[in-house]
Amino acid sequence: MIESSLRSLGAKVVVASSNDEDHPTENIIDGNTNTFWMSTGMFPQEFIIRFADMTNVSSVTLDSYNVKHLKVEKNTSQNASHFEFVAEKELKQTEGHLQSNSISLNGTTATHLRFIITSGYDHFVSVHSVRVHK
């Protein structure tokens, strides 16, 4: 099952390494690929999504631009600390359209997912949407 809007399910972006008031972190979970969060340069960049409840996640789909390497970590406690590595992926560069990548999380359960962008194809990257597949 694909959830098009994590926000409508009570998920929140609780941490982000950079902030641009014109492109806030909430855009990552609004289900609209026309809105986005944009980094302010330098790597790594990261953001953490907190679910309303413990959530089963088989995979996530990330719609982004200029992201080169991504790591995903999970947490199962109520606070956003002590994360465990789940997956990583090298993303292919796209010109003029979004990268859309599905990343298997092998049916994990989590209260938080941390996305760490370790490198990009440019100084700035954008994340347009994160969708969870249960």
Image (cartoon, grey):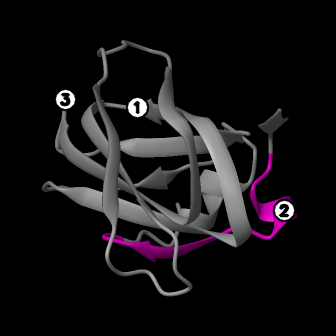
Question: Where, by quadrant of the figure, is residue 96 drawn?
Answer: top left
Question: Label 3 crowding class (10 Å Cα cut-off): few <14, some 14-19, many 20+?
Answer: some
Q: Who is closer to the viewer here, 99 or 108?
A: 108
Q: Nearer the viewer, mark 2 or mark 1?
A: 2
> What span is in magenta?
5-18
User: Which three-letter amino acid code belongs to the residue tagged 1?
Assistant: Tyr
- Locate residue 43, reporting x and y percent: 14, 54
Which of the pair 89/93 is nearer the observer?
Answer: 89
Name the residue type under label 3: Tyr
| Residue corresponding to mark 1 | 65
The picture places residue 88, in percent across and down from the top left corner, at 29, 35
Pick out the residue farthest to the bottom: 79
Q: Secondary structure at mark 2?
A: helix
Specify which label sits upstream in the sequence, 2 or 1. 2
Residue shown at 63% from the left, 45% from the top? 57
Q: Would you place residue 96 above or below residue 24 in this image?
A: above
Whether residue 63 appears in this view of the structure is: no
Residue 46 is at least partly visible in this image: yes
The residue to which callout 2 is attached is 9
**Considering the image in quadrants, where does the C terminus appear?**
top right
Q: Does 108 sit left or right of 133 as displayed? A: left
Q: Quadrant of the N terminus?
A: top right
Q: Residues within 10 Å of mark 1 (few under 14, many from 20)?
A: many
